[in-house]
Amino acid sequence: MSFSSLGLIDQITRTLDTLDYSTPTPVQTEAIPAVLAGRDVMAAAQTGTGKTAGFALPLLQRLAMKGQVSPNCARALVLVPTRELAEQVHESVKAYGAGLPLRTMVAYGGVSINPQMMALRKGVDLLVATPGRLLDLQRQNALKLNEVTMLVLDEADRMLDLGFSRELDAILAALPKKRQTLLFSATFSDPIRALGNRLLRDPVRIETAPRNTTVKAIEQWVVTVDKKRKSELFLHLLKKHKWEQVLAFVKTRRGVDELVELLQAKRIGADSIHGDKPQPARLRALERFKAGEVQILVATDVAARGLDIDDLPVVVNVDLPIVAEDYVHRTGRTGRAGASGQAVSLVCADEVDQLAAIEGLTGQVLKRIEEPGFVPDHRVPETVAGGQIVKKPKKPKKPKGDAKVVTEDVRFRR
Ligand code: AMP
């Protein structure tokens, strides 16, 4: 299967040659002809499947073949949940559209709005944006949405998780009803299906990986540990496995800063990405990590999406995510585009519910390892298939008088 057999024009296939994309990925094989034919699409595709090219290539081709844009308008709109993803998608769009006579732009919050307003004056063919900044631009009359004929919701599940549904509704209300809409989501939760039913007309449904599974090439395991010893265990594993580059996830911004300080004190190059950091600092941290200038990038889930780092060998969940779907997104950072990877989770007794929810969602019981010297005092209850926790039999109570002794065997709980 070649890109040209999917209906892409020479200019684009030549660009793909220069990028060394020789064969379309499964999601590209299905999405490209459908989008070129003007169909709506509902695709379950995680980061790492090549979904960005799946929607960007045919959209760019359609934009290049037909139409012109008016001042302060956009013809295609790609909505994404985070600033990092906005940058990454726009970088891809620029690469895929090299040589096409199209203007593209990215707009997100946390940076000055004025340059974005200026850049919109001539109009843009394709705009990648986060929902909040897009609405700001529209409310300040820098952007009119009445010429948008193609809309992409990328990582729509994440957009809802991050609480963007009101912004989405406001944007959707301002868009022309007659348009092509593409919805991409790593997982198909019920709210996503409802959104799809509301927005899409007779969509082509694409589900290239089974629902809610993590990428197969990733070796995943859990190390059980007491909560207060997680950082120490992280340092130990880093040394033991001689990991060269690690993306580490921590629950809180404070936890991120503490881990970075600890690593730096041990002279290990580390930087962080979290919501408190201004956008330029986040991008700088990502660039330094990508360039190999720092060994460890510590992040909260805000940063989980939108990081495009090829061949990242290791992701460590220093804390498990609160939302089980985030485990899938986090581990999606490694083992990308067919490369193998490892995803290690440091789990304490308090996190057993999260662990069970992850195992239930991904349909697997994660392999557990006890690291000598770190065996926890507070043991993490066993979990079994289906996301259930095995409760330890309670110690029989001392019988009072001749009351019957009731013991419980094994109980399951959701
Ligand atoms: P995405 O899922 O869109 O974030 O893409 C994941 C990674 O795969 C990116 O680094 C892309 O550059 C790369 N990629 C996408 N499509 C192809 C392809 N057909 N051949 C080789 N690499 C690809």
Image (tube, rainbow, N blue to C red):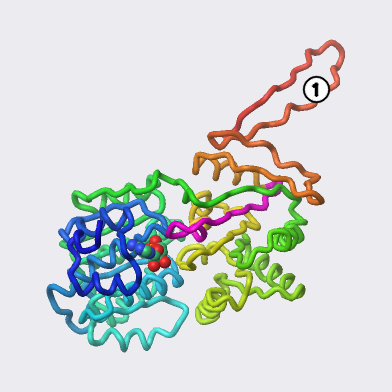
Along the viewing direction, whichever of 390 and 71 lies nearer the viewer: 390
Does label 1 point to a residue whose CB lies under 8 Å from ligand 1? no
Q: Where residue 374 sits in the image (x, y, percent)?
A: 79, 51
> Residue at left 31%, top 81%?
140
Q: Secondary structure at mark 1?
A: loop
Give the total number of marks visible in the rendering. Answer: 1
Residue count near mark 1 (Cα–Cα under 10 Å), binned few <14, some 14–19, many ≥20: few
Q: Is residue 3 above or below residue 295?
A: above
Q: Where residue 60 sits in the image (x, y, percent)?
A: 23, 71
> Residue at left 23%, top 72%?
12
- Residue at the left extreme of this rendering: 66
Along the viewing direction, whichever of 1 and 236 lies nearer the viewer: 1
Q: Where residue 92 sits in the image (x, y, percent)?
A: 35, 72
Which quadrant of the figure has residue 184? bottom left
Look at the image and say whether residue 347 sits in the magenta stretch: yes
> Residue at left 67%, top 75%?
269
Q: Is residue 219 above or below residue 387?
A: below
Q: Amino acid at mark 1?
A: Pro
Along the viewing direction, whichever of 339 and 251 lies nearer the viewer: 339
Which quadrant of the figure has residue 34? bottom left
Look at the image and say whether residue 336 sits in the magenta stretch: yes
The N terminus: image quadrant: bottom left
The C terminus: image quadrant: top right
Residues rendered magenta in the picture: 333-350
* Image position of 272 (left or right of 398): left
Q: What residue is disc 1 on?
A: 396
**Can residue 128 be seen by looking at this rendering?**
no
Quadrant holding ligand 1? bottom left
Q: Where residue 386 sits in the image (x, y, percent)?
A: 53, 34
